[in-house]
Image (cartoon, rainbow, N blue to C red):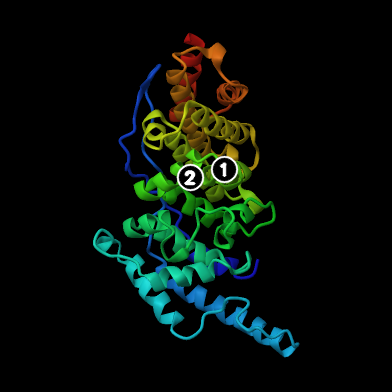
Amino acid sequence: GGGGGGGGAAMDTSAASSSSSSSSSSSPGGVTHSTYYKFESASAVEKIRVKVEELSAALEGQDGAAEGAGEGGGGGGGAMSGGDPVVLSNLCTTLSQTHRWHASSLSYDEFRLLKRLLAWPTTSVFPVLDLLRLVAAHPDGASKLGSSFAGLRVLDMTAPEAAFLTNASDKGAPMPVQLMALRFSCNLLANRDSRTAVATQAAAGDEANNPLSTLTSLAAALTEGGSKTNKNVSSAAASLLVNIAIVCSPAEATKAGWPPLRVASQSDLAMNAVAVGLKGGGTATDDEVTYRLVLAADTLMRNMLASKGGDVAAMSDAFRECGAAVESVLDRTTTQRTSELAQKLTKALADC
């Protein structure tokens, strides 16, 4: 893909895990995991800004050619113009100063610019998604994403600016787009305000516009590493499933006002996705990826057991599939931490 290399420099490969949740709940066989995975590295923001400007110039060239062919309506490709580069530069400065995140805020103009840039073609949008990943990690940014500030509706699955969440699931989507969509999604769930907005929308029951289901489908499609069978993509997909599992936990579900049926349906979707990953090939078999998938299974399944009073007979097909997938991990050679987690969960299920 054109510019894939340039995107590589701007990618955050660290999975900084930090606890932003106190939703651990006691359940059969112990306390469930409650630490969200986040991708907060802002070391390459300047490279990202340069890449956005390069791609904007390329889009402008395409617009010019289209106008020359008599199509008119310049700006269709969404290239930056006027004061846009200054707005972009200000946004990048704010995002790069992570030590000031708690005290800094993002502007209306910055959100309006992001809304326009997110309409770029899938082949060009990856550095914009890398910026969006950082916006979702920034406290004020996450809060504003949750409230559709400045009309930027990334949680509205019918809005053009949210299309990347569906497009990234496509087998042929560029790898950097897949990676950034997953990392953005992890951060979206790791921050309280944006997580609350996602969970509240899921509670509304409009299945055509349920961001949590869209994020679960995205993770399910990419556990094997996406278009380039990339380990970082698998790892981000597994991290997203851990975050989704925590959102489905009793403490979070109660806060969001989910009825038991909603908890069951979102958990089943997530358990299906985890089972697909644990039985998958590609980079899904990497040990760190396997560990995170088992961790997601552990969180989802122990919480389901707690809600059903430990009655395995009352469990769904998705629950059983997920249990079988975890048990199959015991036949593989994995690190001790992965095999111990899988063994403990398998035993807890057998004891019920």
Q: Are the residues tagged 1 and 2 within 8 Å (C-beta)?
A: yes
Please report whichever mark, 1 or 2, sits nearer to the chain's N-terminal start.
2
Question: What residue is rendered at 51% in x and 78% in y?
Answer: 53
Question: What residue is rendered at 47% in x and 17% in y?
Answer: 308
- Pointer 2 residue: 201
Viewer can see residue 335: no
Q: Position of residue 350 (x, y in %)?
A: 51, 11
Residue 259 vertical placement versus 114 (above, below): above
Residue sitting nearer the eye, 25 or 293: 25
From the viewer's perspective, tell me whether residue 21 is left or right of residue 66: left
From the viewer's perspective, tell me whether residue 163 is left or right of residue 51: right
Circle 2 SS class: helix
Residue 249 vertical placement versus 152 (above, below): above
From the viewer's perspective, tell me whether residue 97 is left or right of residue 309: left
- Pointer 1 residue: 206
Q: Position of residue 29 (x, y in %)?
A: 39, 17
At label 2, which amino acid type do we have? Gln
